Structures are given as structure tokens and as C-alpha cells.
Amino acid sequence: MEIIDLNGYEEKRFETAVALGNFDGVHVGHEHLIRDNIKKAKEMNLKSSVLLFKNHTRTTLTNEGKPKLKIITPYEKKVNIIEKLGIDLIFSIDFDKNIMSLSPEDFVEKFLIKKLNSKLVTVGFDYRF
């Protein structure tokens, strides 16, 4: 498995299948999603991958009046769990206002397709932009 910091990086070596999610706890549902991504990537001759934010997305959103966010699984532990599932690549980046402000169309076109060279995206039933 390879961890790739996306700051200033565009994937040009491989076509990828990317699993998307918050992966806040890498629970059973997340594990199923990642395993499905790995299976479909193999079928399509793609590199399986996960887009993993170094910070929780809610830390970038306004949290005024809300209790402090409790992190279920720290970043390093998430990486270890995902590695054990057999993923090929982890794309890692900080979730910030630049990413947050992308329209869904720009996120797909400029981020998933151009930056990650994604040919397949795997998401859970409740995923949204």
C-alpha cells in the first residue's frame, strides 16, 4: 500500500477506483465499502484507493455553539485499518475551505477525474457532496 499526499500531486501512473466517505470510525459499513471498491477495481484493472482526509470535515465547518468534535478513530489508526483491508493507495489531504467550496461538478471533474485519475467511485448509500 502507498500513501500519497495530494498537495501538489496528480495521479498519472494509474487509473484508480476511489472509495469516498468520512471514514470517521472505519466501521463495518466502511469496511464493506472499501472491500467492494477493491473487488471492483480488480475486475476493471484499476488501482483501488481511498480518499482520506487528515482532519474530520466538521473541523472546517462552523461549529459555533456545538460541543467539541470527538474523533472516533485517529488518522494513523484509520490508515492501519484501511491498509489491513488490502487497499492499493490512500490519497491523503487536509479538508479545507478550498475543497469545501468546490461544487459537486467541480469536485468530480477537477478532483476525482483530473487529480485522482478515477474511473470508478464507490460511495455509501448516504454519501453526499
Image: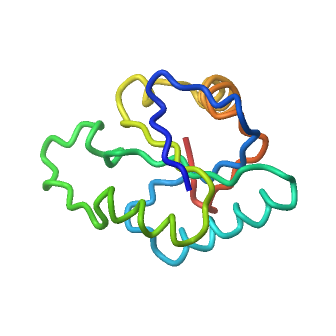
Q: How many marks?
A: 0
Please, is residue 108 above or below residue 67 in the view?
A: above
Residue at image point 64% right, 34% down: 116
x and y, in percent, of residue 9 in the image:
53, 25
On screen, residue 16 versus residue 96, left or right, reads right
Q: Quadrant of the C terminus?
A: top right
Please, is residue 43 above or below residue 53 in the view?
A: below
Which coloring applies here? rainbow
- Quarter holding residue 125: bottom right
On screen, residue 108 versus residue 8, left or right, reads right
Residue at image point 76% right, 47% down: 120
x and y, in percent, of residue 12 in the image:
70, 28
Residue at image point 52% right, 72% down: 84
x and y, in percent, of residue 58 in the image:
31, 46
Q: Nearer the viewer, residue 33 or 39?
A: 39
Please, is residue 127 above or below residue 114 in the view?
A: below
Q: Nearer the viewer, residue 35 or 72?
A: 35
On screen, residue 110 versus residue 64, left or right, reads right
x and y, in percent, of residue 94 in the image:
36, 36
Q: Nearer the viewer, residue 61 or 82?
A: 82
Residue at image point 56% right, 56% down: 1
On screen, residue 48 versus residue 79, left or right, reads right
